[in-house]
Image (cartoon, rainbow, N blue to C red):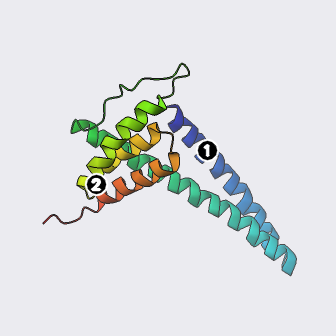
Amino acid sequence: MRARLVAWLMAAAMSVYLVFAVWRAVLLIGDGEPVPILLGLAVLALPLLGVWVLWRELAFGFATQRLGRELGQLQGLPVDDLPRTPSGRVDKAAADARFGVYAEQVEADPDDWQAWYRLAIGYDDARDRKRARSAMRTAIRLHDNPAPRS
């Protein structure tokens, strides 16, 4: 819930920033001189890039949440029973052991979005965020565009 609030606050801040940046860009472009026009275009490009990045991250989060709810309804979510360190992080050795199970599920059926979702959780538990996000993107793609089964 906290992450969602932070995401919406960032989106609101980005919106306010975008309004001010567009206003300044229009003023600079309206000057008519080459240097202010180029500066105005640059001022306009950076917030638009930021909006694109923010939209991409929000869409990823919403898709992840949607798949998690669906997998939960299908009783396919892994049980969160791994031992934890005193700081609350999942024990790395236990996460690595469970990761092997998720990897085998993906190897057995590489077109199963549920297996890829669990693999993403396994990567996240093993503290490999980059591969966790990649596996989650694969799960989203497979869920939204299922491969025909033979």
Q: At 41% from the left edge and 31% from the top edge, which residue is drawn? A: 94
Q: Nearer the viewer, residue 90 or 45?
A: 90
Q: Earlier in the sequence, mark 2 or mark 1?
A: 1
Residue 101 location (% of width, % of height):
30, 41
Can see residue 148?
A: yes
Kindly identify the amino acid type of the residue bearing the numbered disc 1: Met
Q: Residues within 10 Å of mark 2 (few under 14, many from 20)?
A: few
Q: Nearer the viewer, mark 2 or mark 1?
A: 2
Question: Are there few (<14), some (14-19), or many (20+) residues within 10 Å of tag 1?
Answer: few
Cα distance between the residues tagged 2 and 1: 38 Å
User: In front: 41, or 33?
Assistant: 41
In this view, which residue lies farthest toward the top?
86
Secondary structure category for the residue under label 2: helix
Name the image quarter holding residue 44: bottom right
State the residue at coordinates (60%, 58%). Answer: 51
Label 1 element class = helix
Farthest-out residue, left? 150
Q: Nearer the viewer, residue 55 or 119?
A: 119
Which image quadrant is residue 5 in? top right
The amino acid on which the numbered mark 2 sits, given as a three-letter code, is Glu
The residue beneath circle 1 is 10
- 132 or 49: which is nearer to us? 132
Q: Which residue is mark 2?
A: 107
Where residue 92 appears, x then y in whole percent? 48, 33
